[in-house]
Image (cartoon, rainbow, N blue to C red):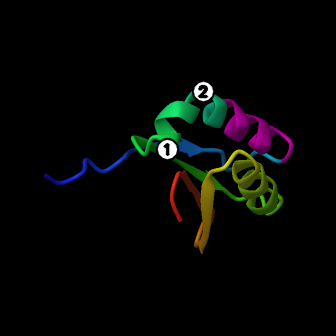
């Protein structure tokens, strides 16, 4: 039996700066923490704020979650999940 892939919920926070980007991310992580931790959901944040690529992953790590960061043409994509 194959495992169901996690549902991805996407947030476009481009144009916002820290601490607003961090506060949005923390609100959503806390709101969906159980589902993320169980591997049922992952959060994807699109940002163009360079500070966010440090503050959001650090906060996710402190909560026991993983955050990957990918630079792209419009900024950065951060994916928060329960696995590396």
Q: Residue at x 70, y 50 (%)?
A: 60
Q: Residue at x 58, y 34 (%)?
A: 33
Give the x, y percent position of residue 14. Answer: 67, 50
Dot label at residue 28:
none
Q: In this orientation, which residue lies closer to the viewer: 82 or 54?
A: 82
Which is the main secondary structure of the residues drawn in magenta? helix
Q: Secondary structure at mark 1?
A: strand
Q: In this orientation, which residue lies closer to the viewer: 63 or 18?
A: 63
Q: Quadrant of residue 20?
A: top right
Q: Quadrant of residue 55?
A: bottom right
Q: Residues within 10 Å of mark 2 (few under 14, many from 20)?
A: few
Give the x, y percent position of residue 74. Answer: 60, 65
Residue 57 lies in the magenta-colored region? no
Looking at the image, residue 26 sits to the left or right of residue 76; the answer is right
Query: Marks 2 and 1, how far apart in space?
Result: 14 Å
Looking at the image, residue 47 sits to the left or right of residue 9; the answer is right
Instruction: In the rendered view, tell whether residue 5 sits above or below residue 54.
Output: above
Give the x, y percent position of residue 25. Answer: 68, 40
Q: Report the mark closest to the observer, 2 or 1.
A: 2
Residue 22 lies in the magenta-colored region? yes
Q: Residue at x 62, y 51 (%)?
A: 65
Query: Residue under circle 2?
Result: 31
Q: Secondary structure at mark 2?
A: helix
Q: Quadrant of residue 68?
A: bottom right
Give the x, y percent position of residue 22. Answer: 78, 43
Range of magenta residues: 18-27
Query: Residue under circle 1?
Result: 10
């Amino acid at each position: 039996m194959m495992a169901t892939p996690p549902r991805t919920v996407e947030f476009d926070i481009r144009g916002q700066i820290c601490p607003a980007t961090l506060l949005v991310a923390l609100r959503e992580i806390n709101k969906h923490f159980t589902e993320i931790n169980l591997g049922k959901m992952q959060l994807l944040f699109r940002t163009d704020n360079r500070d966010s690529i440090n503050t959001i992953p650090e906060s996710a790590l402190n909560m026991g979650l993983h955050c990957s960061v990918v630079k792209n043409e419009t900024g950065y994509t951060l994916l928060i999940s329960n696995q590396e």
